[in-house]
Amino acid sequence: MGLTFFLAATLAFTEVVHACSCNELSMQDNYCGADFVVKAKVLKVTKKAQHTYKLKVKDSYKGDLRGVIYVKTPSASQTCGAGLKKRKIYLLTGEINADGELTTDLCSQNMRWNNV
């Protein structure tokens, strides 16, 4: 009876938690798997269901992107959101989805440029 009550109480207060989980990839594998790789400065962050970053491309290493681009990411790090900071420069990698939108996430190994 005690064990049954404990299990029932535990299950009643258990919350489903979704956390970000990334495969361990080398930088080379990450680069090869990415649709785009750029050095870019974050100009603006729009926070909604997904964050949208307005970026100024400084250099494009893969994907031939130029000028101002918009990149989407999940809104929270628990769902693998990238968490880029305004006015900072990053080495940014990501995918182009079926709608032609540029996307990135925490698993893309994005780095502040001064840490590259």
Image (cartoon, rainbow, N blue to C red):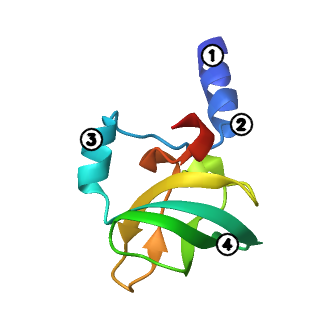
Report the residue at 27% width, 41% height from top.
Answer: 28
User: Does any portion of residue 74 appear in the rendered image?
Assistant: no
Above or below, comparing residue 69 to residue 6 in the picture: below
Mark 3 or mark 1: whose residue is earlier in sequence:
1
Report the residue at 37% width, 76% height from top.
Answer: 97
The reply, left or right, for residue 70 in relation to residue 45 is left
Report how far apart the C-alphas of labels 3 and 1 lie in the structure.
Answer: 56 Å
Residue, disc 1: 1
The residue under label 1 is which amino acid type? Met
The residue under label 4 is which amino acid type? Ala
Report how far apart the C-alphas of labels 4 and 1 lie in the structure.
Answer: 45 Å
The residue under label 2 is which amino acid type? Phe
Q: Helix or strand or loop: what does disc 3 sit on?
A: helix
Q: Helix or strand or loop: what does disc 4 sit on?
A: loop
Residue, disc 4: 49
Q: Helix or strand or loop: what does disc 2 sit on?
A: loop
The label nearer to you, 4 versus 2, is 4
